Image (spheres, rainbow, N blue to C red):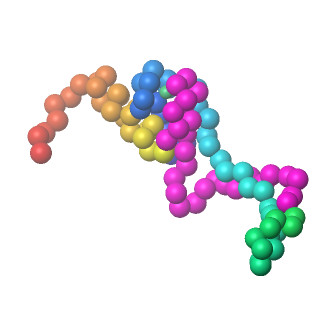
Amino acid sequence: MVDRPYLCPICRSNRTQFDLVFRLARAVVKDAETGAITYESNTMELLGPPRGPEREVHCRRCGYTGAEHLFVRAAQRADERRVPYRRSSR
Ligand SMILES: [Zn+2]
């Protein structure tokens, strides 16, 4: 879906400036008895692209972060409005 047009569903003015949100992970080793962290890596590992739960998009204009499909759907709705056509009623 990343090649589909986006429109921020909140500010509705941004179609071009976004961040794709990825998860960073830091490896830790815990003591099974006390729960204390006995080792913590110095580096962060990039987990992604996420499987299962959907990719998130961050609007760089208003700061909203939401699921990618919300941005794609907002763009589709705006395009439908821009090219009006008669829609059959449900
Ligand atoms: Zn926005």
Find residue 31 and report its image quarter.
bottom right
Above or below, 60 relative to 28:
above
Find residue 74 and report its image quarter.
top left
Query: Would residue 59 be counted in the magenta stretch?
Result: yes
Above or below, 70 relative to 18:
below
Name the residue: 77% across, 77% down. 32
Name the residue: 51% across, 53% down. 54
30 vs 9, left or right, is: right
Residue positioned most to the left: 89
> Looking at this view, is 44 or 85 the one in front?
44
- Whether residue 3 appears in this view of the structure is no
> Looking at this view, is 59 or 73 the one in front?
59
Residue positioned most to the bottom: 33
- Whether residue 52 appears in this view of the structure is yes
Q: List x then y, in percent, for residue 75.
A: 41, 32
Query: Would residue 87 be counted in the magenta stretch?
Result: no
Name the residue: 53% across, 61% down. 52
Residue stretch in magenta: 40-66
Report the quarter where the C terminus lies. top left
Q: List x then y, in percent, for residue 70.
A: 42, 41
Above or below, 71 relative to 85:
below
67 vs 42, left or right, is: left
> Looking at this view, is 41 or 57 the one in front?
41
Labels in figure, total: 0
Q: List x then y, in percent, for residue 5.
A: 48, 33
Residue positioned most to the front: 34
Q: List x then y, in percent, for residue 24.
A: 72, 51
Name the residue: 61% across, 56% down. 50
79 vs 44, left or right, is: left
